[in-house]
Image: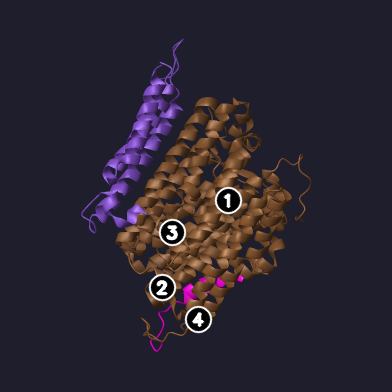
Chain colours: A brown, B purple
């Protein structure tokens, strides 16, 4: 296990950078940009080298673990990496790399504080993915909440601060319920290591197991913004600066999905959840939440709120399809996690780019934005088509697999929600596009003769995401080996037939 | 009896959080909830032994489990930083609205 030293580095490097940024600011502010770029590139290189060595095509086999300080379990705390962790660690590194590049041009005030918080968030995200200890998971989740709240309220306008307050109140409540779940587990099992809990959790009395599950489900529905708790999400995700919206809506929600997958499939007893009323309750709740999210997006006047409610819709459908728990369903759900991350980040970063010209997020103010930068608007249209699910873009394939999974298991309501979501997405996105390409006869805020603001890095980031949208669409089967590995980890192999879509 | 006490403390905090429309009182309600969980955790793992700072050198000596106390301390630190952040945001908000009442601030109602 030569490469296991990379696991702590993935967490320590961003935290160290966050610590170094204020020190470097004292020396010379010009150095800060270099430090940020070097550190985020190193993080990407570490992640890519893990992918290179541990992908099914690579030389070494997963899972690997690293014992912090050389203390072996049960005394010490360990980090571990399996296929699921590899996927999410990659997603976090790549998207944070692009978001940081975008921020270099987008953020124009208090950059020092911004990058400190961004790197703490990055470290906490890698921690959530890699940790192998329930309490560490809680600490990293709370660290995410603490570090991302100032980023939500970063603009310090009245609405941004209100969004920050809402975000932290729901974050605190979610964290408290998570903590109660941890306390119950520790009191009954006397251990906090995820592996040991997974071994002995099913020996507990069934009503007690259900109580623990209920607390974790409440916590994660709050964090994921599923139906009764969906309203904080739109406010928080739309009031933040554009790169932070992409971070929250694109990456952080997926991270809570990773926690969801690890907790309920690997650690806690999934057969119990499948047998009890909890599974179908959460499944239909998530489906209803998905439909509601699309309906709210349909009547929204503000582009960023529209995108945030569309996230509610997509997260609902992903949670529902994962709970179906067949190989196809898990495959479709995880493919959609990857695709939705790429598409939603691209759309939020696009909205930040348009903001330079319109100075407002209202859809009617987007009038004529097409004429400022035609190539970029064309890329926006491509991502919107992917979001709706037009073949051969990436949204189509994941939606197709989700639809198949629902229909094969006889959950027709799920199939209807997938199709209705796509149908509802057509009018609300096309309203944006039709405003965008309509000629601007009124006086524009920034006149066309004026030079557009320098934004080469912003454009590069958005185009990179659009290229990813197209590539993961056409070559979606290239992801199969690694997704296959993750699906195999989530399923008890002896019960299920070999995975159909795999390599 | 003890369990009932912690449960009622938890519900007291929860109801306080739901019914109070004042941001500061709302977070006090949350603090009561958090405190009730921590108290329950610590008291439940107290087997009537010595504090876990002594060596186990005498026969028949019982030490309490140190791990819950470490966890509770960590949770207290996390809660403190969260509350500090929350109060900072409330102070920032008071620059725009001369109120800490949820109903009087339009952006917090919906």
Q: Which residues are magenta?
A: A448-467
Subunit that carries the residue with mark 4: A
Task: Tell me the crowding category of disc 1: few under 14, some 14 to 19, or many 20 or more residues within 10 angstroms, Cα based.
Answer: many
Crowd rating for badge 3 (residues with CA inside 10 Å; few <14, some 14–19, many 20+)? many
- Chain ID, mark 3: A
Examine the structure image and report whether residue A368 is included in the region drawn in magenta.
no
Frontmost of labels 4 and 1 is 1
Residue A287: which numbered mark, if any? 1
Q: Are marks 2 and 3 on the same chain?
A: yes
Assign a secondary structure to mark 1: helix
Question: A421 above or below A360?
Answer: above
Judging by the rendered image, the residue that carries numbered circle 2 is A355
Give the answer, above or below, for where B61 lies relative to A85. above
Residue A449 falls in which quadrant of the image? bottom left
Badge 4 and badge 3 both on one subunit: yes
Q: Chain of mark 2?
A: A
Of the residues under marks 1 and 2, which one precedes in the sequence?
Answer: 1
Mark 4 or 1 closer to N-term? 1
Q: Residue at x 52, y 49 (%)?
A: A256
The residue under label 3 is A237
Q: Nearer the viewer, residue A328 or A41?
A: A328
Q: Label 4, on which residue?
A: A437
């Amino acid at each position: 296990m030569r490469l296991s030293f990379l696991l702590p580095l993935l967490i320590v490097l961003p935290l160290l950078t966050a610590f170094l940024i204020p020190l470097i600011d004292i020396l010379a502010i010009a150095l800060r940009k270099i430090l940020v770029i070097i550190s985020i590139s190193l993080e990407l290189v570490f992640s890519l080298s893990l992918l290179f060595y541990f992908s099914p095509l690579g030389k070494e086999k997963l899972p690997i673990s690293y014992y912090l300080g050389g203390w072996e379990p049960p005394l010490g705390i360990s980090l571990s990496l399996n296929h699921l962790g590899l996927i999410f660690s990659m997603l976090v590194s790549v998207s944070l790399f692009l978001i940081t590049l975008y921020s270099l041009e987008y953020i124009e005030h208090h950059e020092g504080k911004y990058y400190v918080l961004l790197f703490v968030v990055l470290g906490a995200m890698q921690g959530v993915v890699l940790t192998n200890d329930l309490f560490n998971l809680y600490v990293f989740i709370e660290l995410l909440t603490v570090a991302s709240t100032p980023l939500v309220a970063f603009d310090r306008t009245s609405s941004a601060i209100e969004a920050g307050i809402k975000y932290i109140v729901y974050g605190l409540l979610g964290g408290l319920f998570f903590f109660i779940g941890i306390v119950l587990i520790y009191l009954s099992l006397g251990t906090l290591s995820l592996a040991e809990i997974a071994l002995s959790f099913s020996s507990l009395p069934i009503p007690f197991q259900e109580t623990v599950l209920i607390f974790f489900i409440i916590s994660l529905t709050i964090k994921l913004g599923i139906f009764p708790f969906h309203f904080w999400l739109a406010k928080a995700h739309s009031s933040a600066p554009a790169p932070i919206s992409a971070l929250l809506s694109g990456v952080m929600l997926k991270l809570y999905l990773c926690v969801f997958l690890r907790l309920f499939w690997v650690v806690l007893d999934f057969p119990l959840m499948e047998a009890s009323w909890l599974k179908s309750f959460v499944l239909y709740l998530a489906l209803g939440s998905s439909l509601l999210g699309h309906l709210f997006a349909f009547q929204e006047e503000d582009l960023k709120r529209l995108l945030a409610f569309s996230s509610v819709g997509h997260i609902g459908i992903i949670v529902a399809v994962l709970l179906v728990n067949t190989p196809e369903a898990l495959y479709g759900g995880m493919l959609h996690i990857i695709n939705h991350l790429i598409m939603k980040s691209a759309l939020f970063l696009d909205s930040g780019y348009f903001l330079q010209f319109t100075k407002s997020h209202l859809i009617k103010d987007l009038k004529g934005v097409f004429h400022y930068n035609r190539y970029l608007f064309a890329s926006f249209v491509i991502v919107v088509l992917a979001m709706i699910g037009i073949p051969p873009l990436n949204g189509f394939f994941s939606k197709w697999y989700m639809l198949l999974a629902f229909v094969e298991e006889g959950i027709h309501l799920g199939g209807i929600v997938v199709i209705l979501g796509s149908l509802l997405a057509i009018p609300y996105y096309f309203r944006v596009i039709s405003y965008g390409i309509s000629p601007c006869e009124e006086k524009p805020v920034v006149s066309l003769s004026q030079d557009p603001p320098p934004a080469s890095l912003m454009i590069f980031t958005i185009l990179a995401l659009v290229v990813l949208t197209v590539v993961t669409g056409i070559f979606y089967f290239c992801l199969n080996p690694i997704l296959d590995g993750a699906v195999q980890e989530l399923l008890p192999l002896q019960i299920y037939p070999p995975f159909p879509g795999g390599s | 009896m003890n369990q009932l006490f912690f449960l009622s403390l938890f519900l007291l905090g929860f109801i306080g959080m739901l019914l109070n429309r004042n941001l500061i009182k709302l977070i006090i309600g949350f603090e009561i909830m958090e405190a009730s969980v921590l108290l329950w955790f610590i008291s439940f793992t107290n087997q009537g032994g010595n504090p876990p700072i002594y060596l186990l050198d005498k026969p028949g000596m019982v030490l309490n489990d140190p791990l819950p106390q470490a966890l509770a301390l960590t949770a207290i630190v996390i809660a403190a930083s969260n509350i500090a952040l929350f109060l900072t945001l409330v102070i920032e908000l008071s620059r725009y609205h001369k109120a800490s009442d949820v109903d009087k601030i339009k952006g917090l109602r919906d």
